[in-house]
Image (tube, rainbow, N blue to C red):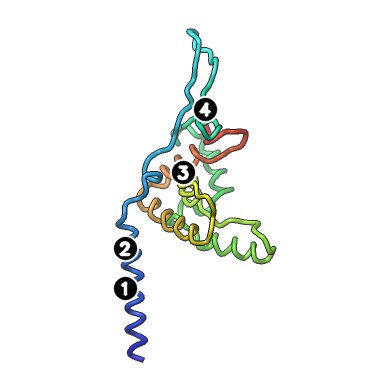
Amino acid sequence: MKHWNIRKTVLLVMALACLGTFFLWPLPEELRVQRHRPPQRIVDRNGVLLYEVRSPNGGLEDAVVLSDIPEGIQQAIIAVEDRTFRWHFGVSVRGILRAAWQNMRSGRIVSGGSTITQQLVRLRLQPERRTFPYKVVEALYALKVDASLPKDAILEHYLNEAYFGHQAYGIG
């Protein structure tokens, strides 16, 4: 019985050491800097737009500050994407469990459990494949991003980078 307690203690210390190391390690550059690339606009002498050169990903990106986005739009995005955005720490265990339950019941993926913070991490890191190990790393980075940025900054970054359809990246 004594060996069991020693094993549990060693595993707990190793797990805490790994988590501590992860949280002390700096965030990847993709998560530290804003990715906004405004389009280059060619205008005539009267300021009339003649041509617009967009980013290589093919979309329009116009960054806006959060204070310029109407409160109703902010609340609508939060309501649709992540109702508990203001209260969780980057990851919603309840959301993950809900999505897992819905996906198990339907036998296919019908719902995701990602928070706005996790979606921002995914937008920034651009994974080739979304596997279970990647989702774990994404969740850890989301915890770290949430600890290092205020909620309004996370929301602003997300609203400026999310795809809104018709080659429009960002709410602008």
Number of marks present in the image shown: 4
Tag 3: amino acid? Leu
Q: Relative to 31, say whether 62 is above or below.
A: above
> Mark 3 or mark 2: which comes first in sequence?
2
Q: Which of the two residues, 32 or 73, is positioned nearer the viewer here?
A: 32
Gap in angstroms between the C-alphas marked 3 and 2: 26 Å
The residue that mark 2 highlights is: 20
The residue that mark 3 highlights is: 155
Residue depth check, mark 4 versus mark 3: number of the one nearer the observer: 4
Gap in angstroms between the C-alphas marked 1 and 3: 35 Å
The residue that mark 4 highlights is: 54
> What residue do we see at 34% from left, 59% from top?
22
Tag 1: amino acid? Val
Gap in angstroms between the C-alphas marked 4 and 3: 23 Å
List x then y, in percent, for residue 91: 47, 57
Residue depth check, mark 1 versus mark 3: number of the one nearer the observer: 1
Gap in angstroms between the C-alphas marked 2 and 4: 41 Å
> Which quadrant is home to the N terminus?
bottom left
Tag 4: amino acid? Arg
List x then y, in percent, for residue 78: 53, 47
> What residue do we see at 50% from left, 58% from top?
135
Give me the disc on residue 79: none
Classify mark 3: residues with Cα within 10 Å, few (<14), some (14-19) or many (20+).
Answer: many
> Mark 1 or mark 2: which comes first in sequence?
1
At numbered mark 4, what does the secondary structure look like: helix, strand or loop? loop
Relative placement, left or right, of 9 versus 165 is left
The residue that mark 1 highlights is: 13
Gap in angstroms between the C-alphas marked 1 and 2: 10 Å
Residue depth check, mark 1 versus mark 4: number of the one nearer the observer: 4
> Mark 2 or mark 4: which comes first in sequence?
2
Tag 2: amino acid? Gly
Relative placement, left or right, of 84 versus 98 is left
